[in-house]
Image: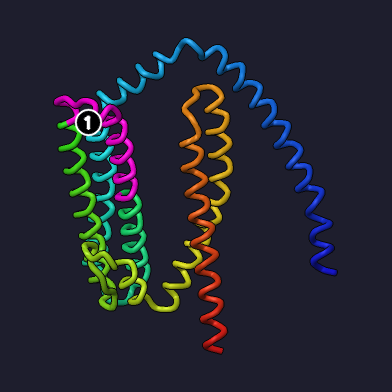
Amino acid sequence: MKQKSENQKAFPRFLGILVVASLIGGVLGGLSGVAGYFWEGHDDLGGTIAHLLGVASPWALTLCAAVLLGLGLRQYRKARTAFRSWDGEDEDVMQQAEECLSRTLLLDSLTVIVSFFFFNAGTEKLPQGSDGNTVLLLVVFLVVIALAILLQQKTVDLTKKMNPEKRGSVYDMKFQERWWESCDEAERRQIGQASYKAYVTVSRFCPYCWGVLLLGNMVFHYGILPSAVVLVIWAVLSVSYTREAIRLGRRGQKTE
């Protein structure tokens, strides 16, 4: 009865959202069709933008990496300073240091993502042709990735100094598994909560991203590949989460 009551209470709101979303989708679809009509004959604009982005990629990558890695290094140094000044009792100091290291890893990950984007933009015409700009981009890309890996290594090493029970090397292909094994129950619970939040966020983001790409295809006619990639990511996320949930459920039953 309780489940039925909850469904009856939630269904009208869900139906209203569905109707509004359908109306908005219809309007946006019509506008996209009109925009696509006017876009025809202006494909050279898209090519020009892609060309300019490709030419600017080495310098844009250098600038973005310098900012992100610089901010990450600053957070790392703040964590190192806090740890060195720790008296062994004040937990607030350790909490501050761990938060700084978390921000360092976030900035490090953003550096890698931005690097992949500009590398993709700058090598769009490969393997048909390449020039000095492409070679420069390759060199910058490799240097940035190496620096990002180094910053990640320094961050993990400092975390291991702060928590001697931690195990794993960033150069180990099984680093995440070894790190997980060295975490205590409280840390695993925190990781699980953060992972679930990430799962929910991506699950909600994928349909919106698919919708934007669907409408964009009506205007720019770039094909179904971008939308298919989003759907593949969505499927991998859902399948991996469900399989792991089933596995953990079976293991829980065996231990009871």
- Residue 251: horizontal and vertical position, in percent? 51, 81
Residue at 47% over, 10% down: 41
Q: Secondary structure at mark 1?
A: helix
Image vertical order of residue 124 relative to residue 114, above or below: above
Q: Is residue 142 left or right of residue 253?
A: left
Residue at 28% over, 53% down: 75
- Residue 24: horizontal and vertical position, in percent? 69, 31
Residue closest to the eye, 220 or 159:
220
Residue at 72% over, 35% down: 22
Residue closest to the eye, 236 or 80:
236
Per the image, is 89 magenta?
Answer: no
- Residue 217: horizontal and vertical position, in percent? 53, 27
Per the image, is 119 magenta?
Answer: yes
Residue closest to the eye, 115 or 46:
46
Image vertical order of residue 119 relative to residue 108, above or below: above
Q: Where is mark 1, residue-wise?
A: 58
Q: Amino acid at mark 1?
A: Pro
- From which residue to which does the magenta span run? 108-134
